[in-house]
Amino acid sequence: MKKVLITGCSRGLGLAMAKRFSLESWQVAGCSRRNDDLDPLRKEMGSPHIFRSADVADEQSVYRFSQVILEEMGTPDLLLNNAAIINQNAPLWKVPSDEFSQLIDINIKGVANIVRHIVPSMIEAGSGVIVNFSSYWGRSTSSEVAPYCASKWAIEGLSQALAQELPHGMAAVALNPGIINTSMLQTCFGSSAASYPKAEEWADLAVPFLSGLGPKNNGESLTVPS
């Protein structure tokens, strides 16, 4: 049984991926900031899947989470750094400092924290794929989402540098998932978000695509096929 670890798995893309990977007979582990948000997933999916609360922006929280996952599940074959937030639409000079800081802590530092505590086990095993979720706004820009754009552009660079550091047989990629109707998109697009695919529809394409990634993809900036 292959093993996948997904951050931010209680809603949106993370939730859709967790359910779809389980249907493909993967063992799924995941985290969310609020423990209560994971209860429906625990009840629906059950054993051998593992869901624990963790705040990716808090290194000690990530350390405790990683210790549990590595002990109970073992080293993941696939690590999906999906957890992220977006700022409320506003010109950069109107984005409050604390909102900007929280976004950077989760979207960038959160990825680094997970890498710091999970990837050494993958390196020791000599295999594994790390997918850091970028965005269309990690390769382009739009007004009123400057903090989010900055964080996802950072993920592109972080992923390429990480790819150069990994041993042969592993891979790190940045992934643009595409435009999907999630609560995050709704904060930006409003009612027009409904014209885009739902997370469950997206996962039907994304999970087979992610399952097929390997060392040959190391360092690539990829987009889920539509």
Image (cartoon, rainbow, N blue to C red):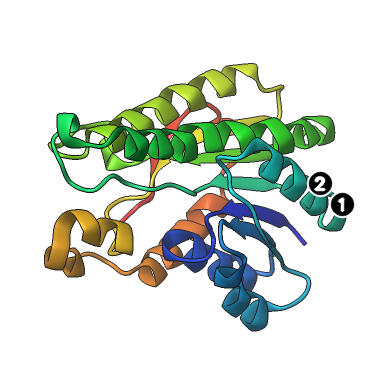
Dot 2 corresponds to which residue? 67
Q: Is residue 102 left or right of residue 72?
A: left
- The disc placed on residue 89 is none
- Can residue 57 be seen in this snapshot? yes
Which residue is at 31% across, 50% downward?
Answer: 178
Q: Quadrant of residue 32?
A: bottom right
The residue under label 2 is which amino acid type? Gln
- Percent position (x, y) of residue 161? 53, 18
Residue 109 to residue 202: above or below: above
Query: Of circles 1 and 2, which is in front?
Result: 2
- Can residue 76 be seen in this snapshot? no
- Percent position (x, y) of residue 52? 69, 61
Residue 115 to residue 38: above or below: above
Q: Is residue 17 left or right of residue 47?
A: left
Residue occupying the far right of the picture: 71
- Percent position (x, y) of residue 203? 44, 64
SS at circle 2: helix
| Quadrant location of the N terminus in the rendered image | bottom right
User: Local crowd at mark 2 within 10 Å, few (<14), some, or many (≥20)?
Assistant: some
The residue under label 1 is which amino acid type? Glu
| Quadrant location of the C terminus in the rendered image | bottom left
SS at circle 1: helix
Residue 116 to residue 1: above or below: above
Residue occupying the far bottom of the picture: 43
Which residue is at 27% across, 67% downward?
Answer: 197
Q: Nearer the viewer, residue 174 or 33?
A: 33
Q: Label 1 to label 2, Cα distance in Å?
A: 6 Å
- The disc placed on residue 71 is 1
Q: Nearer the viewer, residue 61 or 130?
A: 61
Q: Is residue 154 left or right of residue 57?
A: left
CB contact under 8 Å: marks 1 and 2: yes
User: Local crowd at mark 1 within 10 Å, few (<14), some, or many (≥20)?
Assistant: few
